[in-house]
Amino acid sequence: MVANRPILVIFLDGVGIGEADPDKNPFLRAELPTLRGLFDGRVPTLGDGRLQGERALAIPVDASLGVAGVPQSATGQATLITGVNAARHLGYHDGPYPSPQLRQFIARESLIQKYVRAGARVYFANAYPEIYFARMARGTARQGALAWAFRSADIPLHNVEDLRAGRALTAHITNEVWRQYLGYRDLPRLTPRDAGRRLGRIGLENDFTLYEYYHTDVVGHKAHRERTLAALAEVDTFLGGVLEAFDLERGLLLVASDHGNVEDWTVKGHTLNPALLLVIGHDRENFAGGVQRLDDIAPAILRWMGIASQ
């Protein structure tokens, strides 16, 4: 079944908009033909403000949200998925995983709950290995804020059979980590571009689809230059595949993050830089009009989908 106005969100953990300095900002050194193609050969940097391309808009999103300290994953992602300032709710930035208090907050305020109540087709495109489900059964599985938003709305996580059937993707984009380190040797090889095409097709079948990729934050914490460049190039190729398969005339593609990190490889950790938001599609200006902060994104999604915020 094809959605009338599908919205597809690619969440990249720890991606901010960095300085226009190639000694600090790996985006200026990485091979990023897809991203540059969206913005006439440029990549978004601090000082650009809203960078407009032929099909895309790059927005620097305030991730600090008026709360002292360095933005963190749990409160940033909770804010992204609820539209409510989770750091202000707690009184501080928190992460990487949501506390019991924050989990209750997400379960109560998540826009996923609003989608479900409105009868929208909602899809979480990540697959999880069997070892993760075993940990869930024991109560020892660590779960990020975004996955918890779906689980708390009674949307089940995808497993290896969904992955084999082409209904999901690993959190690493391709299947290689599962093949090499998790024992799933029978999984077919999947290029980043083919993975992107798969996600684009999934996105057209649902009203709201989200895919979560956290490796950008991992390489950002390690500040390993070669791995950072490789991760950014892989994401760029993946994005190219999504753009090939997704209908940007009908739908909207968002590439969103929770805080800065990987955009400054002189720092091993999160930054105070604005988080990256790409809005790609024919209706991007209508969507992005009032988006300035992380807590503006969820309300903008609800408005664009025609769903009441309460």
Image: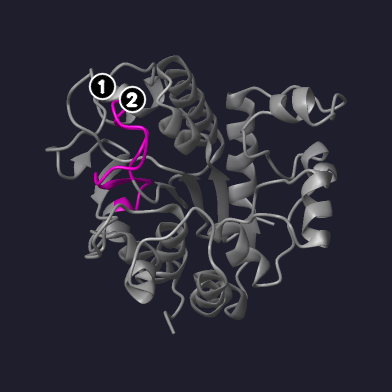
Residue found 61% across the figure and 63% down from its top = 148
Spot occupied by residue 117 in the image (x, y as percentages of width and height): 60, 80
Which of the 4 image quadrants contains residue 50? Answer: top left
Which segment is the magenta one? 260-284
User: Which amino acid is tagged 2?
Assistant: Gly
Q: Which residue is drawn at 57% across and 75% down?
A: 107
Q: Residues within 10 Å of mark 1 (few under 14, many from 20)?
A: few
**Image quadrant containing the C terminus:** bottom left
Residue 101's x, y, as percent? 52, 75
Q: Mark 2 points at which residue?
A: 37
Magenta stretch: residue 266 in it?
Answer: yes
Query: Tag 1: residue type?
Result: Gly
Residue 47: which quarter of the image?
top left
Farthest residue to the right: give it. 186
Position of residue 11 measured from the top left corner of the image (x, y, whole percent): 48, 47
Q: Are marks 2 and 1 in contact (CB under 8 Å)?
A: yes
Question: Taking 246 as reference, is 103 above or below it?
Answer: below
